[in-house]
Amino acid sequence: MWLAACAPTADPGFRDPEVQISATTRFSPRAFAGTWHVIEAYPTVFLPGCADQRWQADTATTPARFAVFCGGGGAAYDAPVAIDPRGALQLQSSDLDIPARALWVMWMDEDAQTAVIGTPSGEMGWIINRTPDLRADRLTAAREIMAFNGYDVTDLQGIEG
């Protein structure tokens, strides 16, 4: 009994795993390509956490690439990515190449300007936008999508530019 109390407990993540996670039908690799600014995120040890965080999705190369940039510096993270046309991105790195950590595009607006990303495990989640500024109504909509997919949005943290 004493040993059981000392055993590490599994981190439940930021979402209720009993809630079904969904991918958007608006996703396409072509629409997702390019630069995204992280507006809000959950803290994670898997990808860099920094102010002025930008993502670069290069979906035209083989293999496709996913990079994270902090400030004006070079890539803080860069890895090949397998893209499921249904809206899941599987980063090809030793700690992220498992289905529970696939990045699901849960929502993307019709103009591919704002998106909501999450993982089935709930360990990670982001609200991203093509520009560093996001209107309040879009942020509210993005947070509602996260909540609909089982995320506790009170734990989201703004990324300062």
Image (tube, rainbow, N blue to C red):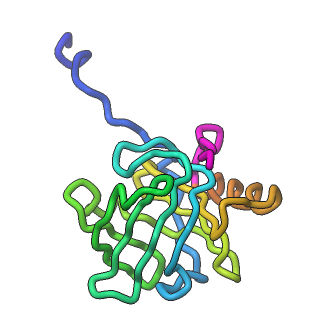
Task: Locate residue 64 relative to residue 111 in the image: left or right.
Answer: left
Q: Nearer the viewer, residue 74 or 113?
A: 74
Q: Is residue 26 left or right of residue 17?
A: right
The spot of residue 105 in percent (x, y) is 52, 70
Residue lying at 62% horizontally and 54% vertically, measured from the top left: 39
Query: Residue 148 at what x, y percent from top left?
Result: 65, 57
Which residues fall within the magenta stretch? Answer: 150-161
Quarter of the figure that contains the N terminus: top left
The relative height of residue 68 versus residue 47 in the rendered view (above or below) is below
Give the percent coordinates (x, y) of residue 122: 45, 50
Q: Residue at the front extreme?
A: 72
Q: Quadrant of residue 139?
A: bottom right
Above or below: residue 114 compared with residue 144: below
Residue displayed at 48% across by 45% down: 50
Does 54 appear above or below 58? above
In the figure, is residue 130 to the left or right of 21? right
Which quadrant of the view contains residue 93?
Answer: bottom left
Q: Residue furthest right?
A: 137
Expressed as whole percent of the image width and height from the top left, the position of residue 119 reads 44, 58
Residue at 58% x, 62% y: name it.
37
